[in-house]
Image (tube, rainbow, N blue to C red):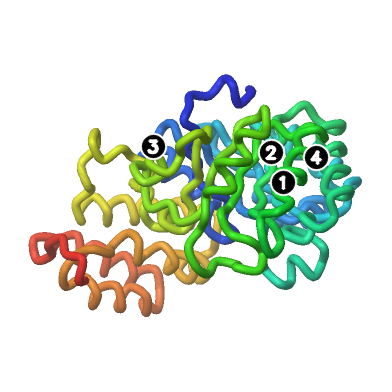
Amino acid sequence: MAWSDLKQPYVCLAPMDGVTNTAFRQIVRKISKQVILFSEFTNVDGLIRSEYVRQRLNYHPSEHPFFMQIFGNNPKSFAEAARMIEDRGVMGIDINMGCPAKKVVHSQHGSALMKDVDTACRIVEAVRSACSLQVSVKTRLGWSNADNLISFCRRLESAGVSLLTIHGRTYKQGFKGQASWDAIYELKNNLNIPVLGNGDVEDYYDGCQRMKNLDGFMIGRKAIGNPWVFQDRQKYPEPNLFTRISVAMEHYHLLRKIKPEHIALKEFRKYLGGYIQGFSHAKAFRCQLMEAPNEQSFLLLMEDMKAKVSHFRLSQAS
């Protein structure tokens, strides 16, 4: 399958480590059929050496179209990982060249590749040579400014990238300040491949408003615990609290299929705020859910909250 086979605009769930695992992706897919799903941010060396990391290659058939995002800096490792990924039937490989985490950059991965263009291109070429999958790259405006964005991305296009996603911040910004999309619009005018925008997208409507000449957008942090963020609100109503709790519980049970109880309980906390926010008097329940000592207590609290939905009303002050 190629990008040209998919309907535009390309609306994507951004790859997020510890968030976009198969459990959450299945929930997003259930609610939004057209969303293009991306895996967690995964180290190529981990895929090659660790059976535990290779579990990230597992996915449900319903998740297609599904991309695996990987990072590293060794072209040979990328080639080996690419063959493994292709064997799993994934649609394509997304190479991370934008993560600003210090431990990632200090290892010459992620954003560091923006300063090592030759290695970045060799990685793309190695993946293209190793498999027949679509190869995309997710990167940033630049290291400290966007001066080299066009030249960097032209090199990536020449190396064989079929799509680019640009986060509208530099490495130096990290996730601070507002994302700027102006340089992304200019970049699109200088390439012959699809370009997606990323950074501060609130929801589907906001993404469509920001797109302009781009081919689509990714939603990241705003999707955590809010899989409805990809729906067109003109066609679908805002989900009520009963629906949100029901979907949250389904999500938790999917997570439990891949994680033991103590890990699933801890990891699910990151989604809770998104599922329950926006309702008056919900804060007290959220606090109790965050502190639930075991699965039985957690599920009982969720059922209790679902039974009392009439006590909660939509409110931005919760």
Gap between marks 1 and 4, in whole Å? 15 Å
Of callouts 1 and 3, the N-terminal one: 3
Q: Which of marks 1 and 4 is nearer the N terminus?
A: 1
Q: Which label number is shown at residue 136?
A: 2
Of marks 2 and 3, the one in the foreground: 2
Q: Which residue lies furthest to the top in this view?
A: 5
> Residue 72: where, in percent of width, then height?
80, 55
Q: Nearer the viewer, residue 53 or 146?
A: 146
In depth, the one of 98 and 191 nearer the eye is 191
Tag 4, which secondary structure? helix
Q: Which amino acid does label 3 sit on?
A: Ser
Q: Residues within 10 Å of mark 4 (few under 14, many from 20)?
A: some
* Mark 1 closeness class: few <14, some 14–19, many ≥20 residues within 10 Å: many
Numbered disc 1: secondary structure:
strand
Q: Position of residue 126 (x, y in %)?
A: 87, 38
The three-letter code of the residue at mark 4 reads: Arg
Q: Give percent across and percent down for residue 175.
A: 55, 66
Question: Which residue was labeled with disc 4?
Answer: 155
Whichever of labels 4 and 2 marks the residue nearer the N terminus, that label is: 2
Left or right of 12? Residue 161 is right
First in sequence, mark 2 or 1: give its number. Answer: 1
Q: Distance between the residues labelled 4 and 3?
A: 34 Å
Give the amino acid at mark 2: Ser
The residue that disc 1 covers is: 95
Residue drawn at x 27%, y 64% is 277
The answer to whether the residues at label 2 and label 1 have Cβ atoms under 8 Å apart is: yes
Left or right of 56 on screen, residue 121: right
| Closer mark to the observer between disc 4 and disc 3 | 4
Check disc 1 and give the amino acid type.
Ile
